Image (tube, rainbow, N blue to C red):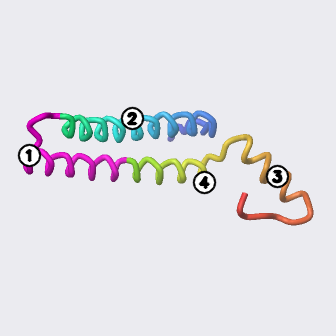
């Protein structure tokens, strides 16, 4: 016999948003680390290359966080968004851009 706990969409959304917050924080830290390299007095080509690598990693992490947030909104829409969708679908016509 398998046991399956009921899924709480709000708890899932909260967990996903916490993971997303961590992704943005990681991206911000990488970006900050990169910009700190530019403030060093002994900036040379090697250090600048390291800066570019860190900025690239930060940009990729920001992109991942944004994509993750879009997925959260698709899979676990907020109560406000659900209410908006319901009100639009019960009105004159459904606007899929909502």
Residue indicated by mark 4: 74
* Residue at the (54%, 53%) spot, across then down: 70
Asked if the residue at tag 2 contacts the one at tag 4, i.e. Cβ–Cβ closer than 8 Å, the answer is no
Mark 3 or mark 2, which has the lower sequence index?
2
Circle 3 Cα neighbour tier, 10 Å, few/some/many (<14 / 14–19 / ≥20)? few
Judge by depth and name the residue closer to the eye, 95 or 86: 95
Whether the magenta-drawn stretch holds residue 52 is answered as yes
Residue indicated by mark 1: 44
Asked if the residue at tag 2 contacts the one at tag 1, i.e. Cβ–Cβ closer than 8 Å, the answer is no
Q: Which residues are magenta?
A: 40-61
Tell me, for residue 86, which label it has, or none.
3
* Residue at the (41%, 40%) spot, across then down: 24
SS label for mark 4: helix
Pair 3/1: label in front? 1
Pair 3/2: label in front? 2
Q: Position of residue 25 (x, y in %)?
A: 39, 35
Look at the magenta stretch and give its main secondary structure. Answer: helix
* Residue at the (79%, 46%) spot, across then down: 83
* Residue at the (31%, 41%) spot, across then down: 31
**Is 8 left, or right, of 54 in this rendering?**
right
Asked if the residue at tag 2 contacts the one at tag 3, i.e. Cβ–Cβ closer than 8 Å, the answer is no
Mark 3 or mark 1, which has the lower sequence index?
1
**What whole-number distance in Å separates the C-alpha atoms at marks 4 and 1?**
45 Å
Mark 1 or mark 2, which has the lower sequence index?
2
Whether the magenta-drawn stretch holds residue 34 is answered as no
Tell me, for residue 25, which label it has, or none.
2
């Amino acid at each position: 016999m398998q046991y399956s706990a009921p899924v709480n969409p709000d708890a899932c959304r909260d967990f996903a948003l916490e993971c997303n917050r961590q992704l943005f924080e990681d991206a911000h830290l990488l970006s900050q680390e990169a910009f700190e390299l530019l403030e060093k007095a002994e900036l040379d080509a090697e250090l600048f290359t390291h800066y570019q690598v860190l900025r690239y990693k930060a940009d990729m992490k920001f992109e991942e966080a944004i994509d993750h947030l879009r997925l959260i909104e698709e899979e676990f829409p907020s109560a406000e968004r659900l209410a908006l969708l319901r009100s639009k679908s019960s009105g004159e016509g459904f606007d899929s851009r909502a």
